Image (cartoon, rainbow, N blue to C red):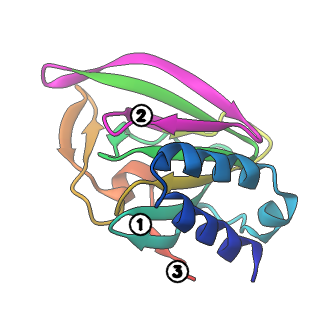
Amino acid sequence: MNPIEEFVNECLSAVTEDQSVTAVKEVVERAARNRSLEEALTEKPGVRVFHCSDDLTVAHVVIPTGAPRSLPHDHRMWAVIGIARGKEANEFFRRDDKTLVASGGRVLDEGEVLAMGDNTIHSVGNPLTHSLSSALHVYGGDLVNVERSMWCLPDWHEEPYDATKVIGAPFEDASL
């Protein structure tokens, strides 16, 4: 079994545990430091979905240098992000009537992991000028097919989620 299949299988096992977010976070923490897994991941920019079911989505997100920051968006489910290579800058927002206001941020370094709740709204970018960002993203549901939102300028108004507008490309099915 290759390292990507092993990672997906460990996530599938973890999501069945009572404290599924904590269990998945532990799996992602190990995976983000696993050099053989990092070497098996592509450097091609975009979002590759390795597994998607009603209770779990496992994806690999590559953000190249110089890519624009994503539009703010929600997931409507918990998420765990682990940085396999580079860095990922997350800016968080909260709803304020019909718009958004910034509410902090966090830059994740290689090997770091972030768990987010199902009400999180954020935008993502690569703060590095010399290296891509490669991250493992695990979600507690069917991220591909759930109704979600994105927020657009000039006034951060809410619209239905469109991956091409948010991240510049549709999700790529890389099912194992």
Measured from the top left, where is residue 75 in percent x and y?
34, 47
Residue that appears at 60% across and 69% down: 8
**Which residue type does callout 1 highlight?**
Pro
- Residue range in magenta is 96-123
Give the class, few, some or many, for how many residues have Cα within 10 Å of label 3's Cα (few <14, many ≥20): few
Examine the rendered structure and indicate whether residue 91 appears above or below residue 159. Answer: above
Instruction: Please tell me which residue lies in front, 13 or 147.
Output: 13
Instruction: Report the mark closest to the observer, 2 or 3.
Output: 3
Give the class, few, some or many, for how many residues have Cα within 10 Å of label 1's Cα (few <14, many ≥20): some
Inspect this view and state whether residue 47 appears. no
Measured from the top left, where is residue 170 in percent x and y?
41, 66
Examine the rendered structure and indicate whether residue 109 appears above or below residue 135. Answer: above
Instruction: Please tell me which residue lies in front, 4 or 168.
Output: 4
Residue denoted by label 1: 170
Q: Residue furthest left?
A: 97
Q: Is residue 11 left or right of residue 163?
A: right
**Which residue type does callout 3 highlight?**
Ser
Q: Which quadrant, please, contains the N terminus?
A: bottom right
Label ID, residue 63: none
Label ID, residue 122: 2
Callout 1 secondary element = loop
Residue denoted by label 3: 175
- The main secondary structure of the magenta stretch is strand
> How far apart, in angstroms, are the residues tagged by discs 2 and 3?
26 Å
Q: Is residue 141 magenta?
A: no
Mark 3 or mark 2, which is nearer the start of the sequence?
2
Q: Image quarter for residue 107?
A: top right
Residue that appears at 52% across and 42% down: 68
Measured from the top left, where is residue 18 in percent x and y?
45, 50
**Which residue type does callout 2 highlight?**
His
Q: Which quadrant, please, contains the C terminus?
A: bottom right
Inspect this view and state whether residue 129 appears. yes
